[in-house]
Image (spheres, helix red, strand yellow):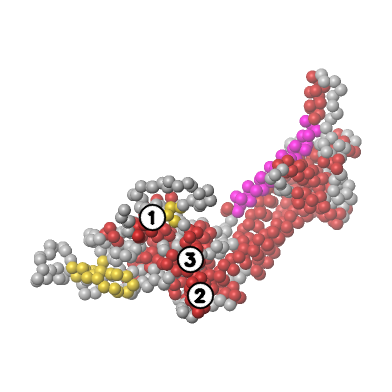
Amino acid sequence: MRLGPLTSQALGRSPYDEVVEGTGEPQPGAPEQLYDDRGRPVNPETRRINRDIIRSHNEVMLVIGVAEPDSGINEAQALYEAATKHQYYEDGIGRKLFLTGEVLATVGVWGVNGLRQRILLYKDYAHVPFSRLFHFHRRQQSWGEYLWAGLPSYVLSDSFAGFDMPEYPWVKYVFSWVNLHLEIFVFMQRTGLVNTSRWVPTLGFFIPGCNDSPIFLPKLPSSFTPGSIISWLGAFVAGIAPFAGYWFFSKTYARLVWSLRRKIQRRLPKPINFSRRRTLKEVVPYLQPPSGTYIPPTPTPEEQQQRQETQPRTPTPTQQQQQQAPSANAIEAGWEMVHAPSDTLPTNDALPTGPPPDGTRRRQSIISVSGPGPGTPGGPNGSTSNTNQSQSQSPAATADEAPFLSDDDEETEHVNPTLITFDVDTSDSATSDSAPIPPGAAVWAAELRPNVPDTSAGSNRNSQQTQTNNSSSLGLDAPLYRDNGLTRLPHVLAAGALGLCAARAMMTPFESLALLGLARPYMARRMGLEGATLDMAFHGLGFMDAFSLGRMFNALALEMVHLAIQCDLWAGMMCVADWFRMSDQEWCEREGVKRRTQE
């Protein structure tokens, strides 16, 4: 049996070959074989291992003195490591400051929440003018007692929030029950319904039907007649309605706060790179090793379709130069890919597009991935010359498939940008000792010649236009921000404060009904107060009573004070964040890394 070419066997089957299924027994521990869009087998783990082996061999040769280190690669590696450390540093500081900001926001809520609940509960606090409200409360309760009331139960409730054991699903519901009762106990202590000397509620507070419980359960009917059962069911519903109403209010309020925070956060300015989000995900914090090539993000199907409709199939000269750019031009690639705007990314000039001297016309290289030149269809001159057009427009050179065609050796070695170029000499179309050549034919000559950038004005305009088209198609025309926890801190904390204050203002009438529904039956059962006495101390339970002018004015005015406190806390956190923030140059000086200034 004749074997096929070794190169074809190494590359795997083509998309036109038939799939030959194996006949052996499948191995249960064998990983699944991955294939690219051309049907070739790919193995990212093997590629990574090969790169590590090559890197270790290079390090050994550097140690024994066989090879000399390249200063450009060392500088690029140093900048790459500095950029990675800078990103991790600011991300960690941002997380710590975010937790600190959340704690301070909770402290601000705790400072005004007790007074707000008293306004929504008692008539005396609603009838007092807002300018005298703090002085009036100072005569009712000391500020130390006001801040301490309910604090131990609140800390215990906050520690129980979100507690879950997947192996025991019922534990989640038990802790939710305890947590909700602790929240009610905190409200009762802060409003004076329960003695403030008790740190945590008694055990009977968590058992429905007990004297201390907020859930009242009527006694069983003496006779099971229809009238007695209906009467008992009515009393049962009336007993659990206040607790159920507060539970519904707490769930609605939490959902509203979350929704408003999300909506406000989307509308606030933020340092997020929408067009290059996947690029940042690949670069930071898991930065790829520095190289001279910028690999654009994998486009979505919609982006691929739009790119095919707006761009020619042949890649542009800028992409060819970026793929073959020497590593010396990418010393700051590891840094600028993360921190710099797109127009400062290291790029080379485009291939010369002007006509060469001596009346010759330069044909594009068959091994390059450059775009249409002056002599190809779609070029500036609109020529119809298409000799070997299928080779220069090979689909293997498209930008969409460039990551799949890159070789390990090409990614790690320095590639000299010298290409094989062809000149068409149209002056000598035939020689004396040769057969006559048909009109339009040409004599081809090949030589190795470096691609020296043309400094002509037309070439510069062509290069700038090509780079602009590439930048807009790859999403590089937008500025690139540093995206981490520290830079996102301002808009995250601002969205949290604005969403919280907006939700509290919107839920003020409903909170008043929920609190009164708990307080009035509880005090009537515990203290034996009648309806007239309750009406003298508490607001009414009517829906229109919840929108009374004095109560709403004092509650909303206090909420404005709360918003001012949140703004002051936000400003203080931003001052602390600015003290920790470091520029690229300051970080490099701290790490002892030298940055080469770009011309």
Answer whether residue 538 is visible to the viewer in this image: no
Q: Is residue 249 magenta?
A: yes
The residue lying toward the viewer, choosing from 501 and 74, is 74
Disc 1 or 2, which lies upstream in sequence?
1
Instruction: Quote the CA–CA distance across marks 1 and 3.
Output: 21 Å
Indicate whether 23 appears above or below 533: below
In the image, is residue 226 above or below residue 395?
Answer: above
Q: Which residues are magenta?
A: 237-265
Residue at (66, 45) in percent of width and height: 255
Mark 3: few/some/many CA within 10 Å (<14, 14-19, 20+): some
The quadrant of the image that shows the C terminus is bottom left
For marks 1 and 3, give the one nearer the viewer: 1
Residue at image position (49%, 70%) is 55
> On the image, numbered disc 1 is attached to which residue?
12
Q: Position of residue 296 (x, y in %)?
A: 45, 60
- Callout 2 amino acid: Val
* Circles 3 and 2 in contact, beta carbons < 8 Å: no
Secondary structure beneath label 2: helix
In the image: residue 484, left or right of residue 306: right
Decide which of tag 3 and tag 2 comes sooner along the chain. 3
Query: What label does residue 51 carry, if any?
Result: 3
Amino acid type, label 1: Gly
Q: Secondary structure at mark 3?
A: helix
Residue at the image position 46 percent from the left and 79 percent from the top:
66
* Labels 1 and 3: the sequence-earlier one: 1
Q: Nearer the viewer, mark 3 or mark 2?
A: 2
* Mark sitting on residue 513: none
> Was residue 548 drawn as part of the magenta stretch in this picture?
no
Alpha carbon separation for disc pair 1 and 2: 33 Å
- What residue is disc 2 on? 60
